[in-house]
Each structure stands twice: as structure tokens, then as C-alpha cells.
């Protein structure tokens, strides 16, 4: 069975290496000193061997891991040696005294000192004065080392040690090796351990005794105190830690925090369950919230992939008394066969209560969407020209009971089977053919929602008339054919719209569609700026989709309040203008008779770097297509808007996208949609980014505007957009108008900063502000986090009166100071997702896509 890749490298106390080296000293030195006894009379210069340079010294910075090197005994060299015969009635021996640059060496270790003494009668050897010992894993500086070669025991006094292959060091009053009935034991008295560099004692473990039995992968620490800047933080009478790279159960390094949840203490424990799976239990105690437990299980199967399981549990929230026994978990599993044909993936998240995340900023689970957790698994087989997949997807609502009935279209797929086929040589005369087919069983967690079994069969034939580098022309035709078997016996909308009872138990449709698209690429070495070059890329698309009655199917067009199994209306950004669908999903195929026109202009500097692009496009409808479905209280900005027919238009919003590289450090990005029919701005999103010092720091102010009519048109079942008021100045008629700034950078090699500030101009109040400051040293990190943002419940208000009550209770305030010990490389506490308290409402992403 294959072993999994190491997820964690545990804390290693490498005194094992020097202890092993001293063991070799006792084992091998008999050969040398017996040799001394035999040759000392005839060859007194034996002790004055010339120093060898090929293996005399092991570099302090060199990491040598080779415990299988044969031991050929020890050699002793010095500037001078004096031999004194020892007279004994039963035994004859000698006392050898070495002085000046004494070196005792073997193939595995070296001991140096100012002087040494060996008693061949008792087989005691003592090295004193500036004693240094090195082996493949550890360096030791000691006052003296005493060893008995017969009993294979030793003692070193007043030691300082450093790891050769791991960043750790410490000191000890004594290191002792003993032998009890053939079993060897090692002890360290009054020892310390830290991963900080030699000039930094930020933290350390202090123990009165450290013991290790020979060949075991761990050491036991007794009366252990954890100290930060020599201040005792906690005490454990006993703890066990690994001393080799072999994985063993034991405590990992702790961390502490102080913040809005109070004082937090985290002490992970690692369970080495088997070579191919392990588990980490991470209990944390918060003074304000109580106990919070996290578990992380990772595994590797024999031929069935690998995965990880994250769990969390809170028995009782001291701050919110009604929250008890909160439990949640997330499973990820992935598999890919050796021949790359079969694959399997699973992503399953679940919590035991619908309001699990409300007032719970400790959870690391997060949500895949605003109102639900996703539970999905997919198995797929892929070949050269086709693939077949089966997917099961469920959603768990994580809302409070007041809005539990709104996301009626969050349908589970139990299951969805998809087939895709593509073969450019399937048809003659350069015709290309592709096919998409699926069979889906839709189920909703809401009892009054319809459910269905849907069969789709969508063949497409397309002909590439040209694929030349400077122009392209393609023709395609698709037949969207579907069959539905709908269960509508329990369907009873709380506020039915006219025609909602037109749903049929059995419904079918075939929607033909034709598409012709083309583009040009025109470039020139002359440009408005001397030395620059430019290009222009016009493109067009004509799309015709037959108008077919689809009112018998539960879709998001005929049932705008909350209809559709998997369909939703698309937005109309520049690149969306050339899509072959107005609705995502397969429940509704909008009738199309439209022409999309657009183009992109690019400007290149003399180095051929793109410094400017500008894209502009619009859709022209050739039928009585109605783009807007706006209620009577829409906020149109011109006379006559009270007439609903005034919203019928034969052209879409005009979409604009631009990126500008003003200088190497200053960039500008903007996307805009404007309705000439309604004489109003639909959406506007703009960011200016300035970076300096080789992009180490940046400042990015931004502004976002989305009109309320545009929001309603693209997503009419959004809970915050279904609120209307007869008062045109009512705040419930607002859309989104927010400005903000993000700054960040690496202030030094150790300090990083990120801060955001977003202000809502409609409501004239702060939407969110955050500050993250992090200091990292070689042995610990210290972080400061401050977050203040509007609660999710603030956006769910339904009256102007409650909206105006923007007091502190409507804000979530999170602050935290976190101190984490850094141990050996790779040792980290694994997490899944991000804490909800650190997830901003508006994430900053570098939006610039200049090539």
C-alpha cells in the first residue's frame, strides 16, 4: 500500500542523532583502544597520527542523512600524547593523555576538544575543553563528554545543541545514556527546545527531564513549561513528541489569540492511525464563547484516490445561549485512474442546523453560496471523442426561518447523467458534429415546489468556413429538444401569478436555433502615438432561436418570482453579448432574432506590450423582444416611464469594457452598461490600481454602481429586490452604489499589510472595513485582524424604518490578535475554507487583463 504524501511534519527533537553517535562511540572504540594496548609499547607514535582531512570535519551548515554508513572504528589524533602504564595485580593497562586539537572521529561523527584522557583498564574516556561534537543531524557544544566503552554509557555536561537538518536548538545541563539489561535509555536533564534562531528566544519548551528509549521514534518530556519571551504560558507534567521523521502520535505546536471571542488557546493533537491515514484533533478554548473542537482526517486509499474530512463541533456557545451542539463537516475526495479515463470527485458539506452560521464566526466550513451548502459527487469516464458522467448534487439551506421559502429553485440533482460527443470527422464535407444529452431528476427541499425528471437531447452541426489568422466565419445549428415529467400535485405558490397553473405533468418541446458568427483581426504599425502599433478586432453574431411556447415547463421566464429548475437569466457584459443563450440552464430557451455587433481596439507600445484596450458592443433585436420586465414602480429617469410598453426595446444595453496601462505602475479598469432606451446607467464598475516598489505595495480605489431595475431584471427573485414602495425616494428602491479602497503590501521582509474600506452611498453608511497586519519571524507569527461590517440580516430589512436604524447592533465587529508557533518545515494545522469572520462582503481581485 502506498504511503500518503506527508501533510504534516511533526516537531522533532534531534538529540537522537547525537545519542546514536555516542552509542557508536561505545560500540566501535574498543577496536581502536584494544589496538592501542597491543601497539603502545612498540609504537608510541601511534597516538600522534597525522590528521586526515578527507573526513575530519562535518560542516555546521551541511545536512547529511546517512545512518547506514559502516562504522570502521575511531581514530584519535592530537598535537601530543603521554602514555602512563597502570600497574594492577590482575590486569595491565595504560592511561593516555591527549593535548592540543584533540580529534576523535569515525565515519559517522566527530568529537573535538582541547584535551582527552583514556583509561584502558576501566575503558573510560573523557574529552574536555571547548568540546564540540557533530554527526549527520546535530551539532553539540559541551563542557566535557565522559564515556565508558565497556558499558556503552556516557554523560555530557553543560550542553548546547543545534539541529543540522531541522531548524531547532536548545541546551541541557546533562545528556546521559544508560544501559539497563541490554536496553539503552537516553536522558536530558534540565533541557530546552526551540525553533528560533540563536539570537532569538521568543519561545521555548523547558523540561526537567527528557527521556528516550533506543530506537523509539519519540521522546517523553516531564515537567514541561512553554515560555514566550521567558514568560511561562502553560505547564504540562508530561508530553510526548517525535524525535525522528517517523510519524507518531503527539501534540503539535499550540497557538494563542485574543479578540472579540475572548482569549483563545489552541493545542492540536496528532493521531498517527496508519501509514495511509491520520487525524488531527484541534480543541480551542475561547473565554467568551467556550470550547470549539476541530478535526482533520486525511487518507489515501489503495487505488481509489485520496481525500480529507474536516469536522467541527461546539457543545455550547456561552455568548449565544440558544446555540447548542453545533456540528458540521466537509468531505473532499478525488480519484483519477492510471489511464486517465475514469475520474471521481466529491465535495460534501453539511451542518446540523439551518441557522448554523448566524452569529458563528468560528466556523471554517463557509458556504458555497449565499443561502446554502453544496453536497455533490461526480463520476466521469472520458475517451477521445466522448465522455459520460453522473452527478448527484444536493443543497442544504442555511437560512433562518423567515426567508426559508424564498430559494424555491435550489433544486437537487438526484442524479444528473450527461453525455457529450464530438467528432470533426463524423460528417462529410468538413461538417462538424457534437451532441449534448442529459437525464436529470430534480428534487426540492421545499414541499410546495414542483419536481421533475428532464431528458435533454441537443445535437449541433457546425461548419467553419474559415479559420485563417486574420478572419473567421462559423455557421452552426442546434435543436434543443427536451421532455419533462413534472410532479405538480403539491405545487401551491403562496402568492401565485396569473398563468402559474399552466404547468403540465408531461411536457415536451423542440427549439431550433441557428447561429452565424465571424470576426476580423486588423493590425497596423502606425498608431496615434509615434512608435506604437494598434489593432482592431470587429466581430458579429446573428442568432435565431424559434419562439416556442414553454409555459407548461417550470422556468424562470414564465414564472419570474422563483421559477426554474436550473435556469437563470444571464447578464449582458461585453463578452455575454456573443453568447448563444440568454438564459443559463435548460429550462427556458428564449426566442432570439438578434444581431450582436462589437469590436475591440488595442494599442501596443514599442515593446509590443498592450497598454490600452477598449471593447464596445450591443445587441439589436429584430422582433418584438422585450428586454425589460420592469414593475410599475421602476425608477426610470425620463417622462413616460409609467407606461409599461415604454420598456419594450429592440436594442440591449450598450456594454463597454476597457483596460488602460497608464504607466508600469498605474492601471485602470472599467466595465459599463448603459440603457439608451431608459436613459439610465445600468451598471458601472471601475478600479484604479497604483503599485510601487516593484509591485510590493498597491493602492486600489474602486466604485461600483448597479441600478435597482437592472438587478431586478437579471435576478427578480432576489430577496432584497422584491421590496417596492410607492415613494420614489424610498430606500427600498435603491440598487447598489458603493465606493471603497483597498491597500496592501509587504512593509518589510517580515510584515505584511492589507486593509479595505467600503462605503454605501445609497444608505450613507459604512458597509465594511478591515485591517490585517501580520508579522512573521523564523519561529513564530503574530497577526492582528480587525473587521467591521454590516450583518447579513441588515440587508433583509423590509421597511424604511428598519433600514434607517443602522446602529451598532446591525454591525458585526471582529478583532483578533493571533500568536502561532512555527515549528519544523511543513508543520501546519490544516484548514478548509476561511473563517466566516474573515470573509469580506466584497473581495478585491486584480481585475486587469492586459496581455
Image: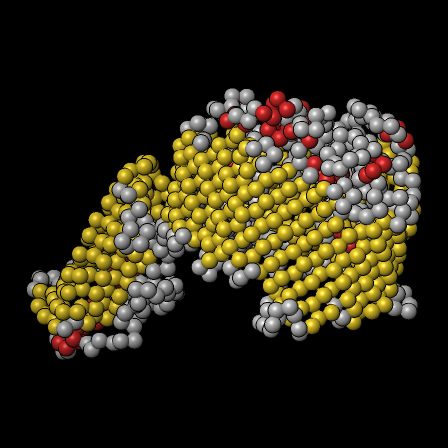
Residue at the image point whose x is 12% and y is 61% from the top: 90
Please name whichever residue, 683 or 208, is drawn nearer the observer in this view of the structure.
Answer: 683
Please name whichever residue, 839 or 427, is drawn nearer the observer in this view of the structure.
Answer: 839
User: Which residue ends up furthest to the front in the rendered image?
Assistant: 639
Q: Where is residue 301 drawn, in percent x and y?
A: 61, 50
Quarter location, residue 70 = bottom left
709 vs 54, left or right, is right
Q: Where is residue 425 drawn, in percent x and y?
A: 86, 67
Q: From this viewpoint, is residue 38 visible?
A: yes
Q: Where is residue 722 drawn, in percent x and y?
A: 72, 30
476 vs 770, left or right, is right
Q: Where is residue 364 drawn, in percent x and y?
A: 54, 39
Q: From this viewpoint, is residue 121 visible?
A: no
Please name whichever residue, 600 or 58, is drawn nearer the observer in this view of the structure.
Answer: 600
**So how many labels did they put on this image?**
0
271 vs 557, left or right, is left
Residue at the image point whose x is 65% and y is 46% from the top: 684
Residue at the image point whose x is 86% and y is 61% from the top: 475
Residue at the image point whose x is 54% and y is 47% from the top: 701
Does 9 sit above or below residue 736?
below
Q: Quadrant of the C terminus?
A: bottom right
195 vs 145, left or right, is right
Q: Quadrant of the N terminus?
A: bottom right
The colour scheme applied to this rendered structure is secondary structure
Amino acid at each position: 500500500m502506498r504511503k500518503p504524501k506527508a501533510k504534516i511534519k511533526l516537531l522533532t527533537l534531534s538529540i537522537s542523532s547525537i545519542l546514536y553517535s555516542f552509542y557508536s562511540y561505545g560500540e566501535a572504540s574498543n577496536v581502536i583502544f584494544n589496538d592501542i594496548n597491543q601497539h603502545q609499547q612498540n609504537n608510541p607514535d601511534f597516538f600522534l597520527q597525522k590528521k586526515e582531512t578527507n573526513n575530519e570535519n562535518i560542516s555546521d551548515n551541511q545536512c547529511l542523512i546517512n545512518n547506514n554508513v559502516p562504522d570502521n572504528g575511531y581514530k584519535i589524533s592530537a598535537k601530543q600524547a603521554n602514555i602512563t602504564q597502570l600497574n594492577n595485580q590482575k590486569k595491565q593497562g595504560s592511561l593516555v593523555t591527549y593535548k592540543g586539537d584533540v580529534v576523535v572521529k569515525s565515519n559517522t561523527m566527530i568529537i573535538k576538544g582541547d584535551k582527552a584522557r583514556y583509561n584502558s583498564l576501566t575503558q573510560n574516556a573523557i574529552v574536555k575543553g571547548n568540546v564540540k561534537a557533530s554527526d549527520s543531524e546535530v551539532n553539540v557544544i559541551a563542557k566535557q563528554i565522559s564515556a565508558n566503552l565497556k558499558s556503552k554509557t556516557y554523560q555530557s555536561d553543560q550542553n548546547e545543541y543545534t539541529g543540522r537538518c531541522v531548524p531547532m536548538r536548545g541546551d541541557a545541563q546533562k545528556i546521559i545514556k544508560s544501559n539497563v539489561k541490554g536496553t539503552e535509555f537516553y536522558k536530558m536533564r534540565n533541557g530546552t527546545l526551540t525553533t528560533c534562531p540563536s539570537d532569538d528566544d521568543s519561545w521555548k519548551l523547558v523540561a526537567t527531564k527528557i527521556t528516550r528509549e533506543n530506537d523509539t521514534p519519540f521522546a517523553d518530556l516531564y515537567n514541561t513549561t512553554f515560555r514566550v519571551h521567558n514568560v511561562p504560558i502553560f505547564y504540562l507534567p508530561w508530553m510526548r513528541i517525535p524525535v525522528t521523521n517517523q510519524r507518531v502520535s503527539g501534540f503539535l505546536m499550540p497557538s494563542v489569540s485574543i479578540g472579540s471571542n475572548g482569549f483563545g488557546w489552541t493545542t492540536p493533537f496528532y493521531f498517527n492511525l496508519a501509514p495511509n491515514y491520520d487525524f488531527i484533533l484541534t480543541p480551542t478554548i475561547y473565554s467568551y464563547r467556550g470550547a470549539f473542537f476541530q478535526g482533520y482526517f486525511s487518507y489515501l486509499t489503495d487505488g481509489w484516490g485520496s481525500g480529507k474530512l474536516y469536522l467541527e463541533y461546539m457543545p455550547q456557545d456561552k455568548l449565544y445561549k440558544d446555540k447548542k451542539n453545533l456540528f458540521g463537516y466537509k468531505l473532499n475526495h478525488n480519484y483519477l485512474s492510471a489511464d486517465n479515463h475514469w475520474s471521481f470527485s466529491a465535495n460534501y458539506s453539511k451542518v446540523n442546523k439551518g441557522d448554523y452560521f448566524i452569529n458563528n464566526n468560528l466556523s471554517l466550513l463557509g458556504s458555497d453560496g449565499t443561502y446554502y451548502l453544496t453536497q455533490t459527487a461526480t463520476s466521469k469516464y472520458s475517451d477521445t471523442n466522448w465522455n459520460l458522467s453522473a452527478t448527484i448534487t444536493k443543497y442544504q439551506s442555511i437560512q433562518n426561518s423567515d426567508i426559508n421559502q424564498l430559494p424555491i429553485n435550489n433544486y437537487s440533482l438526484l442524479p444528473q447523467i450527461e453525455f457529450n460527443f464530438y467528432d470533426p470527422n463524423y460528417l462529410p464535407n468538413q461538417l462538424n458534429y457534437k451532441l449534448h444529452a442529459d437525464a436529470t431528476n430534480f428534487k426540492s427541499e421545499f414541499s410546495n415546489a414542483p419536481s421533475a425528471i428532464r431528458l435533454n437531447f441537443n445535437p449541433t452541426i457546425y461548419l467553419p468556413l474559415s479559420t485563417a489568422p486574420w478572419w473567421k466565419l462559423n455557421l452552426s445549428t442546434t435543436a434543443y429538444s427536451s421532455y419533462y415529467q413534472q410532479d405538480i400535485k403539491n405545487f401551491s405558490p403562496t402568492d401565485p401569478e396569473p398563468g402559474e397553473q399552466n404547468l403540465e405533468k408531461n411536457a415536451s418541446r423542440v427549439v431550433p436555433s441557428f447561429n452565424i458568427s465571424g470576426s476580423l483581426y486588423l493590425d497596423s504599425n502606425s498608431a496615434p502615438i509615434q512608435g506604437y502599433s494598434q489593432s482592431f478586432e470587429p466581430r458579429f453574431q446573428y442568432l435565431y432561436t424559434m419562439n416556442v411556447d414553454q409555459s407548461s415547463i417550470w422556468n424562470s421566464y414564465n414564472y419570474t418570482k422563483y421559477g426554474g429548475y436550473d435556469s437563470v437569466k444571464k447578464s449582458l457584459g461585453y463578452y455575454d453579448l456573443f453568447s448563444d443563450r440568454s438564459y443559463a440552464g435548460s429550462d427556458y430557451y428564449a426566442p432570439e432574432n438578434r444581431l450582436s455587433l462589437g469590436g475591440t481596439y488595442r494599442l501596443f507600445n514599442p515593446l509590443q506590450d498592450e497598454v490600452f484596450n477598449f471593447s464596445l458592443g450591443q445587441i439589436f433585436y429584430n422582433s418584438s423582444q422585450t428586454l425589460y420586465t420592469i414593475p410599475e414602480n421602476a425608477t426610470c429617469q425620463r417622462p413616460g416611464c409609467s407606461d409599461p410598453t415604454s420598456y419594450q426595446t429592440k436594442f440591449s444595453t450598450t456594454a463597454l469594457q476597457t483596460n488602460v496601462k497608464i504607466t508600469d505602475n498605474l492601471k485602470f479598469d472599467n466595465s459599463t452598461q448603459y440603457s439608451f432606451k431608459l436613459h439610465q446607467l445600468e451598471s458601472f464598475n471601475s478600479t484604479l490600481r497604483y503599485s510601487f516598489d516593484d509591485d510590493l505595495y498597491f493602492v486600489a480605489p474602486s466604485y461600483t454602481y448597479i441600478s435597482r431595475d437592472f438587478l431586478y431584471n437579471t435576478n427578480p427573485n432576489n430577496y432584497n429586490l422584491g421590496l417596492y414602495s410607492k415613494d420614489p425616494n424610498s430606500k427600498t428602491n435603491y440598487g447598489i452604489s458603493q465606493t471603497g479602497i483597498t491597500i496592501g503590501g509587504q512593509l518589510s521582509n517580515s510584515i505584511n499589510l492589507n486593509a479595505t474600506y467600503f462605503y454605501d452611498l445609497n444608505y450613507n453608511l459604512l458597509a465594511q472595513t478591515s485591517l490585517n497586519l501580520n508579522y512573521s519571524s523564523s519561529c513564530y507569527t503574530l497577526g492582528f485582524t480587525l473587521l467591521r461590517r454590516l450583518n447579513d440580516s441588515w440587508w433583509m430589512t423590509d421597511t424604511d424604518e428598519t433600514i434607517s436604524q443602522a446602529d451598532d447592533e446591525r454591525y458585526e465587529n471582529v478583532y483578533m490578535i493571533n500568536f502561532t508557533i512555527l515549528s519544523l518545515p511543513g508543520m501546519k494545522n490544516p484548514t478548509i475554507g476561511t473563517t466566516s469572520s474573515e470573509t469580506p462582503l466584497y473581495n478585491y481581485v486584480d481585475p486587469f487583463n492586459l496581455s
